[in-house]
Image: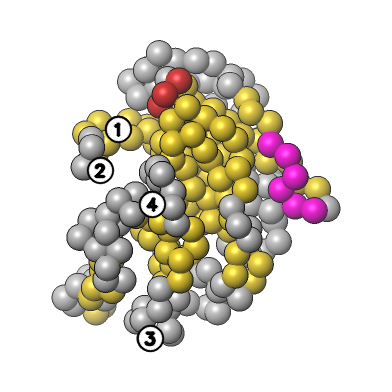
Amino acid sequence: FFGVGQGLCAFYPGLGGGQFGPYLPFGMGVPGISTAVLADLDVDGDLDVVCGAPGSGRIDWFPNDGGGQFPQRITLEQGLSQLVEVRVADMDGDGLPDVVRSGGAALAWSKALGGGLFQPSETIGQLFDAQNMDIRDIDLDGDLDVVVADNGADRIVLYKNRLDEVGMAEHDRMQARVWPDPVVGGVLHWSGFPDQVVRIVVHDGLGREVLGASSRLG
């Protein structure tokens, strides 16, 4: 499966035995698509597609009709001045897949309401230039935290999720250390945290990966 920047998404259907059929395009007319995620957003048992398009400043999702076709496009957000990455994860522990985005000065999430409906996005934290992120249970307390590369400040920031009866109520911004260059800065060690791997990637102006490295937290 892949997304391309010519106004479409596409996937290769599996035929079995390691063979794939010709690619099937969908989602025509969305310029600048560069990130795509597979997730069951409407919780109907099949995988839908979430596409982020920095070129048009929008996030769309395409419900799977159950037969591997995606005839409908639903806009989740639009008018985003900067967008780098989109992830899907259950951030508030209610069993529904929420949508998290990074890019520019903000890290934000949209809470799922069920049936493919979402609340307007809420800001998790303000950053200088939010880039790639990873979502893991960093502190092993049963909820998902967010680690994000803040390119404008040359640092990696951990947002610790604190769940209560109303869901994702508060985040703590934790800057354990500052590395002048987190991409090539070697091993990152935050005492007291389990081993996790965070991938930091540098892209050029066309969205192509020009430098990537994995750093271990632990």
Confirm whether the magenta stretch covers residue 115: no
Residue pointed to by mark 4: 57
Task: Say which quarter of the image contains residue 61.
Answer: bottom left
- What crowding class fits label 3: few (fewer than 14 Cα within 10 Å), some (14-19), or many (20 or more)? few
What's the amino acid at mark 4?
A: Gly
What secondary structure is found at the residue carrying circle 2?
Answer: loop
State whether residue 181 is above or below residue 144: above
State whether residue 54 is above or below residue 171: below
Label ID, residue 67? 3
Relative to residue 18, is residue 216 drawn left or right? right
Viewer-closest of 204 and 94: 204
Quadrant position of the N terminus in the picture:
bottom left
Q: Earlier in the sequence, mark 2 or mark 4?
A: 4
Task: Say which quarter of the image contains residue 184.
Answer: top left
Marks 2 and 4 sit apart, C-alpha to C-alpha, by 14 Å
What's the amino acid at mark 2?
A: Gly
Q: Residue furthest front?
A: 79
Viewer-closest of 155 and 71: 71
